[in-house]
Image (cartoon, helix red, strand yellow):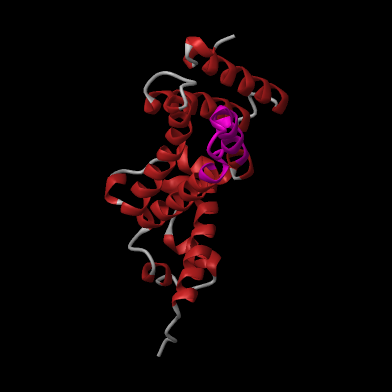
Amino acid sequence: MPRILSESEVAGFRERLCDVAARIFIEKGRDGFNMRELAARLGVSAMTPYRYFKDKDGIFAAVRARAFSRFAGELEAALPGPGAAQDAGKALADAYVRFALAESTSYRLMFDLSQPNEQNQPELARATARLRAAMTGYVRRLVEAGLYEGDPDILSQTIWAALHGAIVLHLAGKLTRAEFDQVRREALDTFTRAFMRPSRRR
């Protein structure tokens, strides 16, 4: 009779499974992933992963949800405290870049690969919404402080697109680190000039 695992043991194995699965997804893509190889790398029977996830789509969603949650957590932790709204833009960019470069594998899984019916994966949907809320929270702080003007959702998506584009080019080897840092600074400066309230401009 199989030994009954504790909750911590189950959680620990799920974490290890997701770590190994993430590497396979990066190496072979979503279509090249298969449960048999996952089991072999984990050193377990071919059926063991099915005790934890229904199929590879469930695993892929869990892997991406973990990454989105970690990313959101990094952004939330870096949000300046009350009275420091003017530092929010730089804090957002710094935290975003720090995560994307330190966890480039996870970053690619989050944005390079998609999956059908993401709305049917509640954990992934919550994690994605959390990241978006974290991004918007920075810009909302600037708008509420009277520093920027505009819709925080649209403004945050604008800076998100700029950061993501620069990071993808850098990770693809199209921008050196020095070029990437310069592009990032110019993008933030352009964003600031475009959306700062006229009364705040020098």
Taking 47 as reference, is 70 above or below it?
above
- Please tell me which residue is depicted at 54% across the width and 59% down the height of the picture: 20
Q: Is residue 84 magenta?
A: yes
Residue in front for this viewpoint, 52 or 7: 7
- Please tell me which residue is depicted at 48% across the width and 74% down the height of the picture: 8
In magenta, the rendered stretch is: 75-98
Q: Is residue 32 left or right of residue 96?
A: left
Q: Is residue 63 magenta?
A: no
Report x, y in % for residue 181.
67, 25
- Please tell me which residue is depicted at 44% across the width and 42% down the height of the picture: 131
Q: Is residue 34 left or right of residue 105?
A: left
- In the image as oriented, which residue stretches furthest toward the front? 83
Taking 102 as reference, is 85 above or below it?
above
Quarter of the image with the N terminus in it? bottom left
- In the image as oriented, which residue stretches furthest toward the bottom? 1
Residue in front for this viewpoint, 117 or 67: 67
Residue in front for this viewpoint, 7 or 64: 7
- The secondary structure making up most of the magenta span is helix
- Image quarter of residue 157: top left
Taking 77 as reference, is 190 above or below it?
above
Quarter of the image with the C terminus in it? top right
Report x, y in % for residue 133.
40, 39
- Image quarter of residue 170: top right
Report x, y in % for residue 113.
44, 40
